[in-house]
Amino acid sequence: MRKRNRKLMSILLTLSLLTALLAPMAAYAGTTYDPVTTKTYSSDTSGYSELGTFSIDIDPIQDDSSALIEVVDADGDTLNMSVADTVYDTYTNNPDYNNGVLVFTPKNVRTDSNGDQYCKSFLADLTMNTEAEGNEYKGWVKIFADVSDASEGELTVKITKASGQLVSGTVVVGKVTGGDVSAEVLSVDCMNDTGTNVTIRLTESVTGSFEESKKSVKLTLPSGFSWSNGDSDVISGAITLDTSTGYTNGVKTSDRDLFLSVDAKSTSKVILDITADIDVDESKASYGEVKASISGDTDMATSSLVVAEYGEYGATVSVEDATTVVAGMLDQEIGTIVVEEDSPGSLNDGNKTITLTLPANAKWYDYPDVDDSNITVNTTPVAVGNDGRIIKYNVTTASDDKSGKIEFKNGKVHLSCGETGDLKVKVGGSAGATGEATVATIEPAITVTANVTEVKIGMQEQAAGDIEIVEGMAEAINDDNDLIVELPSGVEFQGTPDVEVVEGDLDIETGNIDVDEGTLTIPVSGSSTTASKIKISNIEYRIDRTVAEGEIQVKIGGGAVNEVNDASEIEDLYDCSDSDGYNPSENNQDGDFKIDDDGIFPSVEWAAKVANAKCVTPADQTAIYKTVFTIGSATYTVNGVEKTMDVEPYIKNDRTYLPIRYAAYAAGITDANIMWNEADQSVIMIKGDRVVKMVIGDTTMYINGVAFTMDVAPEIVDPGRTMLPIRYVAQALGCEVTWDEATQSVTIN
């Protein structure tokens, strides 16, 4: 062959080879392995355990494939896999993915001491369904492996020697860790001498955490308490418990000890509830938390557990959300009164009662609502008495295995003037609850201060000190009402003082301020948003010769600060046309008390008192004053000058009764020397060196501490006025008393 021909042949062969190399080849899409679930195991888990599931995804499937499957621990050691238990199938049995057949063939099968077959690896063969070429194949694999000797860390499925569309790779299907068991009491109950039942939940952190042992878990109660009637319930997971004689589902009790006996470790993570009764030996048991110690062969997350509270019969009274209220005001909300049993059954049922009693300066407006748990209390209380202070609730069903709790909430009250500090409700009744609940702090509507000047009797245009009236809080002074400033008998305003708001934003009608002898009226047109201060200045007094030496006490009140005694405010609140004689309970409203013409608390008229002058010239003690009172008339005369009382004299048991204030005036005594003691219901009058004391309902009168007997006793009449037998009072104070039958009048000289 010629050289040229040989060269041509070489070129043709080269082109033929290049053409062959450029011919198309099969090109496969990506194959992925993904964990569907992963599981965690204890480092001492025994037997074959179910590992997490992983998926094989080929999209699209185009060929048959194969690979070698192994499971390795964190150190790379190959684990034994169960031949019988390992599962593989189309993913979730979904026909859309059923485009191939996956078969696992165990390699080098062996048999363990229990007769179970295992292998170190599987050969995975995936055969494509020919009619499904080009569709997605998805399968899942669940392997059971012996993790008892596995190192702590991840468990990994290892895929090698892959061909076709299966590729080499790894997927994490589990984790081995040092496991323990946690314990909790589902509900810590209060108990008394009758004991209680308790449920203790034990939870494995990983499969196999419970040890195989007669004392897998041991719970020991303190002295004075013992276990009985133990049992268990496996909430989730799989474990073999001891059911031999003396054990109930793995539980055995022996005095203070409770044992959980495990025959075989869990094959999946276990949650288990132990139930048992706690019995009490009251001669040894101590009140308070009942704490069980936890021990045994299982690693426990905690060494002790509070399983119950042990207490004697009784109840605790407390308050939630105490409020701030204002003295002299209607419709004041108080805090929630909470009554909690110290142990179940402490509060008796069978129509036994719980009473709520307000102090003398308060009356119920809205009865508290009831919110009870583990005990039943009727929701509609009944008034006790007719002074509006006491209500009672019936306990209809006592508590059983849990201590009862009762909340009395959303209660509202009316408050008299004058009292400040803590508002306490007394809890009592036949059910067994006792205590006091501080439901609110009472703030004064106003506080009053003044400068004090010196004045003399029998003179006009005498300068008195400035008076400052300070709100206790914003809105404490009511709008659309009057603030009243009243002087004592014998003292009158001379001219109209200057009145102004010097702090805050309270609105007063300065153009309508009025003076009537000893009374200054200040109309309030708008309440404040900031606590305000009113200043009264340029005050001048006209003082007659009856005024005693000493301080001149100015009283401040009126509907603006004494709402509870203002008829219009009361009528608006109760939606009634006339509050005189009105009783809320008779009109299907809360509160059983009678309101009279002088209000809800008629004996407390004034919100504050202050001295802004001092009389330094005493009244003429040698002067003679003739005072005439007529039975059934509110008008009386002093040296021929008519004056008016707020209650009429009357005759009872042949004795003439006069209101204390005017009886004292007739005897030449000023307000400063008249004292009322609410605690013992007594009145004291001082004139010169003589002190007279009388007690409501008592016929004994004391003069400078010496007891004298009267044939009648002082008394209180509507509207809350203290009435004294005038003859005894006048004579005790050195006055002469005469009676005129014709005119039905009594004269005191």
Image (cartoon, rainbow, N blue to C red):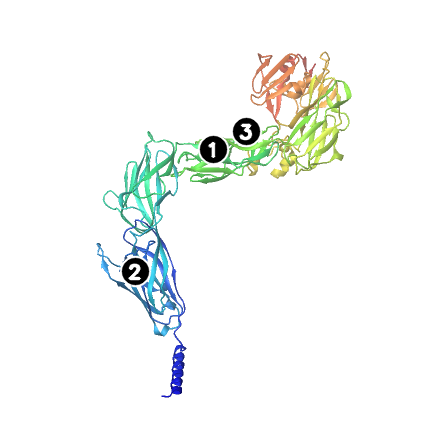
Q: In this rendered view, identify the residue nearer to me: 431 or 277.
A: 277
Q: In this rendered view, identify the residue nearer to me: 523 or 233.
A: 233
Q: Which mark is residue 359?
A: 3
Residue 626 visible somewhere in the drawing = yes
Q: Is 348 placed above or below 123 here?
A: above
Q: Residue 222's image quarter?
A: top left
- Residue linked to disc 2: 86
Q: Amino acid at mark 3?
A: Pro
Residue 745 visible somewhere in the drawing = no
In the displayed structure image, the side of residue 503 where residue 286 appears, left or right: left
In the structure shown, which secondary structural element does the residue marked by tag 3 occupy? Answer: loop
- Residue linked to disc 1: 317
Q: Amino acid at mark 2?
A: Thr
In the structure shown, which secondary structural element does the residue marked by tag 1 occupy? Answer: strand
Q: Residue 196's image quarter?
A: top left
Q: Position of residue 719 (x, y in %)?
A: 62, 27
Q: Position of residue 489 (x, y in %)?
A: 70, 22
Q: In this rendered view, identify the residue nearer to me: 682 or 335.
A: 335
How far is the residue under mark 2 from the one under mark 1?
Answer: 64 Å
Q: Position of residue 268 (x, y in %)?
A: 32, 52
Q: Residue 139's image quarter?
A: bottom left
Marks 2 & 1, CB-CB < 8 Å contact: no
Q: Amino acid at mark 1?
A: Val
